[in-house]
Image (cartoon, rainbow, N blue to C red):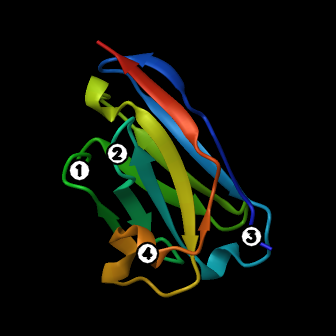
Amino acid sequence: QVQLVESGGGLVQAGGSLRLSCADSGRTFSSQVMGWFRQAPGNERDFVAAISRRGGITSYADSVKGRFTISRDNAKNTVYLQMNSLKPEDTAVYYCAASRSGYSSESGYRQGYDYWGQGTQVTVSS
């Protein structure tokens, strides 16, 4: 059973940093592609970043390239999202997701993922 729990959200000023964590209580973490998505009020849930099973391949939405970094620690069953130079438009609920499929073009889309966390709120003030 895959259960994803996000943490690390909060309120930060523009230009600040936050690190989100997502812990997986299951036994298959290292065999899963992991991703981060975000959803602002009134918007769809959008792709932010993804990482392959061993962490060798990563991808990012254009809006966060150069500012956000996704990483994972398979020994701790945890994936991270380091967010720097935050902007007010980064305000959203951030969701962690896990995919049983291999890393592919589908890793950048919601339909590519099988399990989701409950989300953590990130608010960036101007």
Quadrant of residue 23 within the rendered picture: bottom right
Task: For marks 1 and 3, give the CA distance.
Answer: 28 Å
Residue 54 locus on image (x, y percent): 53, 76
In the image, what residue type sits under mark 1? Lys
Q: Front-most of 116 and 55? A: 116
Quadrant of residue 115 within the rendered picture: bottom right
- Any part of residue 57 in sight: no
**Mark 4 vs 2: CB contact within 8 A:** no
Where is the N terminus found, in terms of image quarters? bottom right
What residue is shown with label 3?
2
> Residue 94 vs residue 22: left or right?
left
In the image, what residue type sits under mark 3? Val
What residue is shown with label 4?
111
Could you say which disc has been placed on residue 65 in the image? 1
Secondary structure, mark 3, is loop
Residue 64 locus on image (x, y percent): 26, 46
Residue 80 locus on image (x, y percent): 54, 51
Could you say which disc has been placed on residue 68 in the image? 2
Given this view, does label 4 or label 1 mark the residue nearer the observer?
Answer: 4
Task: For marks 1 and 2, give the CA distance.
Answer: 6 Å
Instruction: Say which residue appears at 48% left-offset and 47% top-offset.
Output: 81
Relative to 47, residue 13 above or below: above
Q: Residues within 10 Å of mark 4 (few under 14, many from 20)?
A: few
In the image, what residue type sits under mark 2? Phe
Instruction: Say which residue appears at 53% left-offset and 32% top-offset.
Output: 121
Secondary structure, mark 2, is strand
Residue 72 locus on image (x, y percent): 56, 61
In the image, what residue type sits under mark 4? Gln
Task: For marks 4 and 2, give the CA distance.
Answer: 22 Å
Earlier in the chain: of badge 4 and badge 1, it is 1
Earlier in the chain: of badge 4 and badge 2, it is 2
